[in-house]
Amino acid sequence: MRTYVKFYFSSEGAGPLDLVDQMRNIGFRAEVGDFDFSVEWHTPEQYGNTVRKMHSLLAGSRVRYTLMTKT
């Protein structure tokens, strides 16, 4: 399965380029098009761990996000 992430940035928070390396470091790849990043996973545990890491990374950044998972 692959989960796609779309970010919504504010001029009051972290900028888009501030997150690229950090997202890559936790396993995401940058996307071009409707989504900003994606990550592949195979078990619910992998999904949970990755999403928790991303959520912690974004805490306090004033960046909002949505997730979409596809098979």
Image: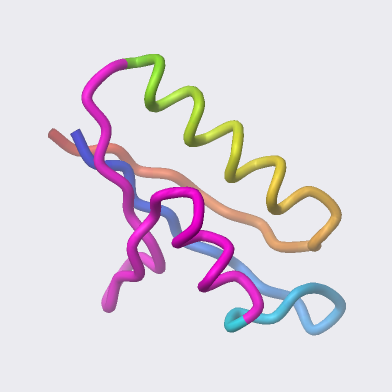
- Most extreme residue toward the front is 25
**Quarter assignment of residue 40:** top left
**Quarter assignment of residue 64:** bottom right
**Above or below, comparing residue 16 to residue 62 in the picture:** below
**Above or below, comparing residue 59 to residue 23 in the picture:** above
Q: Residue at x 48, y 23 (%)?
A: 48
Count of numbered badges drawn on the protein: 0
The N terminus sits in image quarter = top left
**Above or below, comparing residue 54 to residue 42 in the picture:** below
55 on left or right of 70: right
The stretch of residues the image draws in magenta is 18-43
Residue nearer the viewer, 34 or 50: 50
Which percent across, then down, holds residue 21?
53, 71
53 on left or right of 4: right
Q: Residue at x 54, y 64 (%)?
A: 7
Q: Is residue 36 magenta?
A: yes
Colour setup of the view = rainbow
18 on left or right of 71: right
Which percent across, then down, holds residue 19?
60, 70
Q: Is residue 16 magenta?
A: no
The C terminus sits in image quarter = top left
Q: Residue at x 22, y 24 (%)?
A: 42
Q: Residue at x 49, y 49 (%)?
A: 26
Which percent across, then down, holds residue 16?
60, 79
